Amino acid sequence: MAEELALQVGVNAEVSRNEGNEDYQKLTPSGRYWVRNTSPSRQKTVRTKPRGLDEETSANFSRIVQVDIRMDDNIWGSLPDDILIEILARLPPFTLFKLRSVCKAWNLIPRNPSFLKFHARAPSHGPCLLTFWKNLQMPQCSVFSMPLKAWYRLPFSFLPDWIFWLVGSSGGLVCFSGLDGLDFKTIVCNPLTQTWRILPNMRYNQQRQLIMVVDRVDGSFKVIAASDIYNDKALPTEVFDSKLNSWSLNQIMPAVNLCSSKMAFCDSRIYLETLSPLGLMMYRIDTGCWEHIPAKFPRSLLDGYLVAGARSRLFLVGRIGLYSTHQSMRIWELDHVRTMWVEISRMPQRYFRSLLRLSAERFECFGQDNLICFTSWNQGKGLLYDVDKKGWSWIAGCALQSWNSQVCFYEPRLDASVF
């Protein structure tokens, strides 16, 4: 509904200000552009695909029937530009891309400073899933918008032709790590604006496990490279600060054996699973120090993923059971006071058998804001669990069919800067 209203506002505004003229000019904060005058009463509404942003396919959701609302030209045609820009700034970014075909001025709206100011204050569009894979050596990227219930293809040929893989996303930015020949590189980009940068090399420039954190207050970001072992040498934790444009060395993590290389960011802290010492290692970003949390893992845990939730909640997701016929997927939450994992949910068997048909089949798990997503490498499926509503739902779409696709939660934002 917001898309139709905004589109009608744009057409009515162009017509009302210039009635009686065969051609006319529209003054905007970006400048003046000539546009042909066409009466909205005679104009046939044509749905166009956004430039560089193609809608692929819808998930298995019902479509809402939208009513054609006739808007008074005398009211909406005289809408001030600043109010119009504020309205557009509140629309989902994918809807805004469709509206860029209204006129040349609207095509330049995403670059307008006034628009970006309002867009930065607007509420988040909502959770999205970003999938990344390579098809015939060409990088491919698609985004599933949960509020709009549709997949969108993002052009991704702007990145260097390297061998790289998805690290994660935060605050509208996406982080990749890869190899340029034999050199380990880190890339941060904004898929919507197609802006990107290569971070300087680390002091110990070896392949490391990374995590990116964006500070929405000042627009900066940090990339943390966890401690690692290379050639029997312990590598320190390194942190990149975009405000300083440099890496800093921090404490070496006091852990001998990691249980999983996956990290979770929760409440300004980074968590890792370790076997020696048993439990969790917690890294405080503000102090640059590691601490050990002696939280024992559940018995018969086959594989576990740490998942960050909202409001300092930390989840552990994994399979239980030694035999394939008795396996189940369970979710625990860390009780910070008692330092123990408390089971909060189990995946119904019908979902578990459909997601993982083989006992040794690999799966990925990640979360954001109390949403946990499961993906299967072989089945090409996505399963979403809402911790608050305790509901399970499938996510369908061709973007999950590739066996080498990498997935993470993503927040589309046009104001997120890589510099």
Image (cartoon, rainbow, N blue to C red):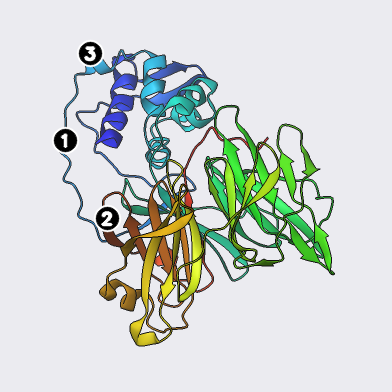
Residue at mark 1 to residue at mark 2: CA–CA distance = 36 Å
Mark carried by residue 68: 1
Give the residue at x 42% y 73%.
319
8 left or right, relative to 209:
left
Instruction: From the viewer's side, name the closer residue of 68 and 146.
Output: 146
Q: Amino acid at mark 1?
A: Asp
Secondary structure, mark 3, is helix
Mark carried by residue 74: 3
Mark carried by residue 390: 2
Residue 127, percent from left and from top: 40, 46
Instruction: From the viewer's side, name the closer residue of 340 and 347.
Output: 340
Q: Amino acid at mark 2?
A: Lys
Q: Amino acid at mark 3?
A: Asn
Mark carried by residue 313: none
Q: Say whether disc 3 or disc 2 marks the residue closer to the N-terminus.
A: 3
Residues at circles 3 and 2 in contact by the CB criterion of under 8 Å? no
For the C terminus, the image quarter is top right
293 left or right, relative to 161:
left
Whether residue 378 is visible here, answered yes or no, is yes
Residue 271, percent from left and from top: 58, 53
Question: Dot 3, crowdedness within 10 Å: few (<14), some or many (≥20)?
Answer: few
Whether residue 194 is visible here, answered yes or no, is no
Secondary structure, mark 1, is loop
Instruction: From the viewer's side, name the closer residue of 302 and 165.
Output: 302
Residue at mark 1 to residue at mark 3: CA–CA distance = 18 Å
Residue at mark 3 to residue at mark 2: CA–CA distance = 48 Å
